[in-house]
Amino acid sequence: ARHFSRIAGEPITASHFDTEKIDSHLKINLQVISDGGEIVAQGRSLTEIRNQLGPAHVSTIVDVTDETWHQDGLTEWTWCDFPTEFTITRGGTRLAAFPTLVDAGESVNLRLSDSRAASDQTTRMGLTRLLHLLHRKQIKSQVNWLPDLDRHSVILARVMGSAELKSRLGDLIVRIAFVEREKIPRSAAAFQELQSNATERIGAATQDVAKWLPKVAASLHQVLLRIDELPTRFVASKKDIQFQFDQLFVDGFMTKSPWQWLQQYPRYLDAILYRIEKLTETDPTKEARHIELVDRFWRQYADSLQYQQTQAIIDPELTQFRWMIEEYRVSLFAQPLGTSIKVSDTRLEKQLKLVR
């Protein structure tokens, strides 16, 4: 593009080239070689190769024989250092791998990952599990203390069971107290330092959840009532609102959603209520146009997510794009409630360009 720009005297960028039309023989031929030297897959793109290998190979976890990085059933920090990066050898080639702590339910496992972003994301979930196990009694006590928990459980039964709610709330308290906005500890000493004021951290996190939970439950209850009561003439709006609700409360939402955005759930639900209350006064053409605008960005998000999942890509920029769409909904349908970040069509387009 730079060369042609000099010749033409006009700015030419890489985006002017349609790479789909490049002859196959001009693209690099990639091969996956087994330890025995056999070609097990080959193609002109990583996507093509991953499709040949199948879903069993869509993983960021690396199989190793080194017992240091292949341990199961851990309930305490029994290893020493936890480096950011580790070097392994494959077929005579030295490759970077990333130590990873994996949540295994009642324990954690040590593994290596081939992606730094995936390693960090998985490790934060593993740290949450490990710290929950280490402070199980205190966390259980704090969850049971949460005011009106039984009443909130009844309301939230539409999205999760009572036992699951308590477990998720416990994880959330741990995540707020020790994991989010904190660096991943890279040594046993750093891990102990993280817990040096555990009681204070857990107490403060519990207070945050105690303020958040009743707001979510109250707004959720009202939203569910109003959605059910929507007249049939608002069928398109009802379908869009139900879809938004389902995506907010997707299975595991309390674990998957960053606390930064979980905190916004009461406002998102209030925005839905505001939209429903104003439907009779809203110009149907304007409502339809807003639905179309949101749907366009959501389809782009869904397509990107599907692609990244098939390629085992973890992309924080896509996560940011997803929550920008949620804020965009507020700006379109419930503008008086305000947004937590600046958002517009242009900002969404710019963010999409950052997505892998």
Image (cartoon, rainbow, N blue to C red):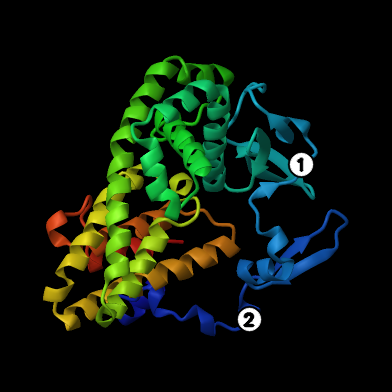
Type of amino acid under label 2: Ser
Determine whether, in the image, residue 266 is placed left or right of residue 321.
left
Q: Is residue 314 above or below residue 191?
A: below
Q: Which mark is residue 159?
A: none
Callout 1: 10 Å neighbours few (<14), some, many (20+)?
some
Q: Nearer the viewer, residue 66 or 344?
A: 344
Q: Amino acid at mark 1?
A: Val
Give the answer, above or below, for where 253 lies relative to 293: above
In the image, taking residue 236 as reference, residue 92 lies left or right, namely right
- The residue located at (67%, 70%) in the rendering is 51
Quarter location, residue 291? bottom left
> How far from the left and from the top, in percent, is residue 11?
30, 75
Residue at x 20%, y 54% (from the top left corner): 339
Q: Is residue 338 depicted above or below 129 in this figure?
A: below
Q: Secondary structure at mark 1?
A: loop
Q: CA distance from mark 1 to mark 2?
A: 35 Å
**Who comes first in sequence, dot 1 or dot 2?**
2
Query: 205 or 71: nearer the eye?
Result: 205
82, above or below 297, in the image: above
Q: Is residue 150 visible?
A: yes
Give the class, few, some or many, for how many residues have Cα within 10 Å of label 2's Cα (few <14, many ≥20).
few
**Element carrying mark 2:** helix
Mark identifier at residue 24: 2
In this view of the protein, can residue 349 be seen by the observer? Answer: no
Q: Position of residue 352 (x, y in %)?
A: 36, 64
Q: Tell me where residue 193 appears, x and y as whole percent.
A: 48, 17
Q: Nearer the viewer, residue 103 or 304?
A: 103
Observer-nearest of 34 and 221: 221
Picture residue at 46% right of the left edge, 81% below the top: 18
Instruction: Identify the residue under disc 1.
Output: 64
Quadrant of res 53:
bottom right
Q: Position of residue 257 (x, y in %)?
A: 42, 48
